[in-house]
Amino acid sequence: MGHIRVRKETGKLFLDFKYKNLRCREQTALNDTQTNRKQLKSLLTQIEALILVNQFDYAKQFPGSKMLSKLEKSTKAIIQTVNGTPNFENFANTWFDELQSSWRISYREKVRNILDNRILPKFENEDVGQITKADLMQFRAQLAKVTRKNGNSLSTGHINKHMKILRMILNEAADRFDFITPYRNIKPLKVPKTDIAPFTLEEVSLILSTVRPDFTNYYLVRFFTGLRTGEINGLKWQYIDFDQKLILVRECLLNGRTEYTKNDGSYREIQMSQPVFDALQKQFTVSGEHCYVFTNNNGQPLDNNNVAKRVWHPLLRNLALDARSPYQTRHTSATLWLASGEAPEWIAKQMGHATTMMLFRVYSRYVPNLTRQDGSAFENLLNTKFTGVHHD
């Protein structure tokens, strides 16, 4: 299904639709008004109807369009080339269409963005069976030289994401068209290991006793549950089980919309410690009438960037604490659990890790002699050392 979109730079509307498995974007001189959108919507409906019955004449509708040459190449590519493999763009779009329904919306958008902006401009006119390992290595080297608008280069991890998508496409094409994939013995670039920077229990206590009162419950829950940012911002009251003292992690909030959790392992139940239980009961008196647990003044879920900019970073500066990402609250949960002697298996389950491997890799220097396995050791740690927030 096509869309009517607006180009931010000019404010002009354009058509965005699929034809012959290609994404087509045709610009207009129309401003973004309700009347113009209605007019273009009518045109788009006609175009899609003609495409459906195979009677759409692109050249007649959009004479002089830049898409005409691309469509011509695509049409030729549909007839397989000498070695029996299709055009890369054609196959990549087919691959994307087949898999996108199984992906989260945010991941789908990420893959589509990488395809449209980096991979297709490089390989769109190539025959999938003619792409070589040398081509792939050259592409990776080019990515390392890319400079973003903010002046930064692409991170190693981001380059690996580009290459992973290429690998999936080429391996699938090789499997379908019976050729040897060029993506052999290409290992991901080594991602520099970054040290985590969790807070100590004393720092947590200081933060919770100083933060704006309307965010005390929010940060207490963040520090003592290991919830990811999207998970706590997307947390709904329907997933709070006060009777069993459980937080049911089922969804997360990404780019302003609710989606399924990051992966199947993230779909979990978190046991509430007593401070978390008390904080959520107190929060219920504030936002219990709304869908989301933590909301803004309009009852809508919190915007992470806004909260970080207006609350989190100013608070750390005020307390003379090192600047750290709000995500460090999750690392803090893990290190506090480890410090209290909880079993790695229990902690991994709380964090949403499938195994303890990630736990030991990231938090190895925080692991003491572990003997407990039920959450009670963490309760004891809080009872004996946590002196931050008093719930009246």
Image (cartoon, rainbow, N blue to C red):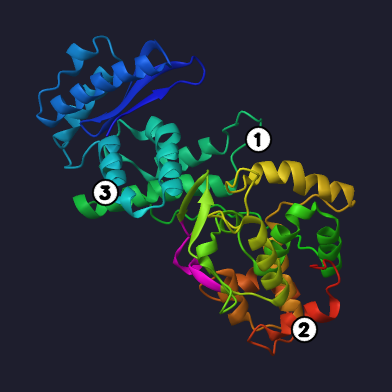
* Amino acid on which the number 3 mark rests in the picture: Glu
* Amino acid on which the number 1 mark rests in the picture: Asn
Dot 1 falls on a residue whose secondary structure is loop
Q: Is residue 266 magenta?
A: yes
**Residue nearer the viewer, 70 or 316:** 316
Q: Earlier in the sequence, mark 1 or mark 3?
A: 3
Can you see residue 86?
yes
Q: Earlier in the sequence, mark 2 or mark 3?
A: 3
* Amino acid on which the number 2 mark rests in the picture: Asn
Callout 2–callout 3 Cβ contact below 8 Å: no
Residue 336's label in the rendered image is none
Q: Earlier in the sequence, mark 2 or mark 1?
A: 1
Chain part drawn in magenta: 260-269
Q: Is residue 108 magenta?
A: no
Q: Position of residue 126 (x, y in %)?
A: 30, 34
Callout 1–callout 3 Cβ contact below 8 Å: no
Q: Position of residue 185 (x, y in %)?
A: 43, 56
Q: Position of residue 119 (x, y in %)?
A: 41, 37
Specify whether 281 is left or right of 241.
Answer: right
Going 15% across and 18% down the picture, which residue do you hit?
57
Asked where in the image residue 28 lies, by quadrant, the reply is top left
Cα separation, mark 2 vs mark 3, equals 51 Å
Specify whether 330 is left or right of 256.
Answer: right
Residue 152's label in the rendered image is 1
To which residue does mark 3 refer? 98
To which residue does mark 2 refer? 380
**Residue nearer the viewer, 58 or 188:** 58
Cα separation, mark 1 vs mark 3, equals 34 Å
Label 1 environment density (alpha carbons within 10 Å; few <14, some 14–19, many ≥20):
few
Dot 2 falls on a residue whose secondary structure is helix
Label 2 environment density (alpha carbons within 10 Å; few <14, some 14–19, many ≥20):
few
Can you see residue 196?
no
